[in-house]
Image (cartoon, rainbow, N blue to C red):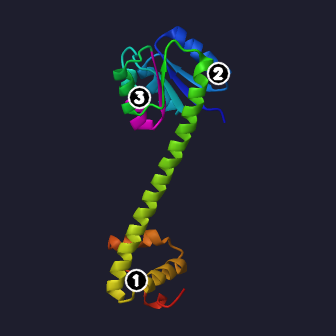
Amino acid sequence: MKATILLVEDDRLVLHMLSRGLQAAGYDVLEADSGEMAMQLCTASSPDLALLDMRLTGMSGIDFARWLKTTLGVPFLFLSAYNDSETVGAAAELGALGYLVKPLDVSQILPAIYTALQRAGEIKKLQQVESDLNTALKASRGISMAIGLLMQRFGGSADETFEALRAYCRGNRKRMTDVADQIVDRKQEIDLLPFFGKR
């Protein structure tokens, strides 16, 4: 699949030149000449990467990048005619994957775009792993709490109670995490005695 790049540049000539070059390189391009227009484009289609002029008229590139990061989680590169340490530092602090200094030649920026897309893919995978781990941790915590409550009620060991709960869930075709949540929230009383000793 072709990557979609959001290009936000208030200089129409630069916008047109970069857009044509990126399309020729095989990318789908969303063009905007302001942060406000870019926001509207993003509500209809979420890009894989954004190239942002830092000093846009109206909403600044920094403000738009902040919105893009917190709202959609879209990675971005900055384009700027300025390469002073303060400006570059602001871009890095915001989490930009790169900083390209104008004037720009498309053939020169393609490696930076390719690298940024690769890095963005790695970040997305890491975020998914973190989300999966948080979900697993939450589920594990809920099951542990339910096991503790059931041990108090039925007097079995942790292993015996876990196996009984698992057998109950299998027999009733229910997910253990769902049953555990209901036990912890006191929304369900279950009789595990028939399931002790079953595997």
Residue 22 or 146: which is nearer the viewer? 22
Q: What's under tag 3, amino acid-wise?
A: Ala
Residue 140 placement, left or right of 174: left
Instruction: Give me the residue at 36% from left, 82% from top.
Output: 150
Residue holding disc 1: 158
Magenta segment range?
Answer: 66-80
Q: Residue 84 carries which label?
A: none
Q: Residue 65 carries which label?
A: 3
Location of residue 57 in the rendering, given as x and y in whole percent from the top left corner: 38, 14
* SS of the residue under disc 1: helix
Label 3 or label 2, whichever comes before in sequence order: 2
Residue 1 placement, left or right of 70: right
Location of residue 23 in the rendering, given as x and y in whole percent from the top left corner: 64, 21
- Residue 188 in view: no
* SS of the residue under disc 2: helix
In the depicted structure, whether residue 153 falls above or below residue 79 = below
Residue 6 placement, left or right of 137: right
In the depicted structure, whether residue 189 falls above or below residue 49 = below
- 69 in the magenta segment: yes
Measured in 3D between alpha carbons, the distance from the residue under mark 3 to the one under mark 2, in whole angstroms, is: 22 Å
Residue holding disc 2: 23
Q: What's under tag 2, amino acid-wise?
A: Gln
Dot 3, how many residues are within 10 Å of its Cα: few (below 14), some (14-19), or many (20+)?
many
Determine the residue located farthest toward the front in the rendered image: 85
**Toward which corner of the image does residue 114 lie, by quadrant?**
top right
